[in-house]
Image (cartoon, helix red, strand yellow):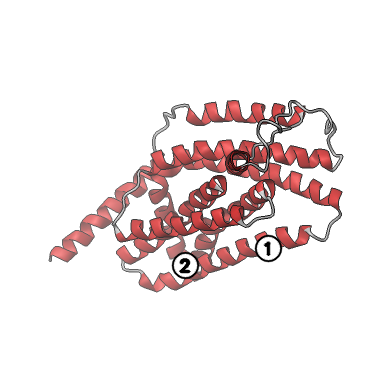
Amino acid sequence: MFGNYLIGLREGLEASLVVCILIAYLVKTGRRDALRPVWLGIGVAVAVALAFGAGLEFGSQELTFEAQELLGGSLSIVAVVLVTWMVFWMRRTARHLKAELHGKLDAALQMGTGALVATAFLAVGREGLETALFVWASVRASSDGSYAPLTGVLLGLLTAVLLGWLFYRGALRINLAKFFTWTGGMLVVVAAGVLAYGVHDLQEARFLGGLADKAFDISATIPPDSWYGTLLKGVFNFQPNPTVLQVTVWALYLVPTLALFLAPIGSGPSVRVKKQKATDEKADAEASAGTTA
């Protein structure tokens, strides 16, 4: 459940911060007339993400067992690729996310209503589709017939919405770089478990071989139905009797990915980001001067 809570929190907070930055910028610059198309774009993005998740869940139920395993395994791998790209991208751009979004919003304001809707939709929609896919893959990997995985995701999303609201109201300040580094590292561990489970699905679909080649079997020591077995499965998608291929893929993904993710980055903000930051500071100064007058 913790792993799914982390997914909901991390992905939901990204979307919440994007929404807060867009709305706050429009309010601060006196462009409240642009709020409606922005909210429209956000609403469409949420609807598309929900429809995508529902399509994955209900569409897969009509397939044969092998087809379900093939689809589940393939989409699990796609989800891991997308989430891995996302955590690296967010770690690099978190400190400059505000300036990046302000620049895109300024360009959209000049182009008109349609551009505003598209900007909001793309900013939130990407997060929504990634969340729907990875949540579906993770819930499928850790599902034991209960509602615990989905409950964890929903609690994470609700926490993200609350934190986003507090962030918007100024009651909470978040060091985004540190937050996304810590949660990104934990998400890489969760993704490694999803990847291993996806490989197991492909083996059950007979797309990959080696299903009978077990790396080890500690089911007697850590029973899957025990509280600690359930905890390990919920957090890390732990399996007490994985195949050799599962363990190999898990290690080949986790070790280098985590090492690269935790390595220090030395790149500073781009020229475009610096220019946008200067524009924002100028707008803040003018707004303060107007208020004083």
Q: Position of residue 287 (x, y in %)?
A: 22, 61
Seen at 53% across and 26% down, the residue is: 259
Reply above or below: 108 against 219: below
**Badge 2 element:** helix
Pointer 2 with pointer 1, Cβ within 8 A? no
Tell me, yes or no, if residue 264 can be seen here: yes
- The residue that mark 2 highlights is 38
Residue 252 image position (x, y, % from top left): 66, 26
Q: Closest to the observer: 279 or 224?
A: 224
Quadrant placement of the C terminus: bottom left
Q: Which residue is mark 1?
A: 54
Q: Toward which corner of the image does residue 243 lie, by quadrant?
A: top right
Q: Residue at x 35, y 69 (%)?
A: 31
Quadrant in the rendering for residue 62: bottom right
Q: Looking at the image, which is closer to me, 249 or 237?
A: 237
Sequence-first disc among 2 and 1: 2
Task: Tell me where residue 198 appears, x and y as whole percent.
Answer: 72, 41
The residue carrying pointer 1 sits among few (fewer than 14), some (14 to 19) or many (20 or more) residues within 10 Å by Cα, namely some
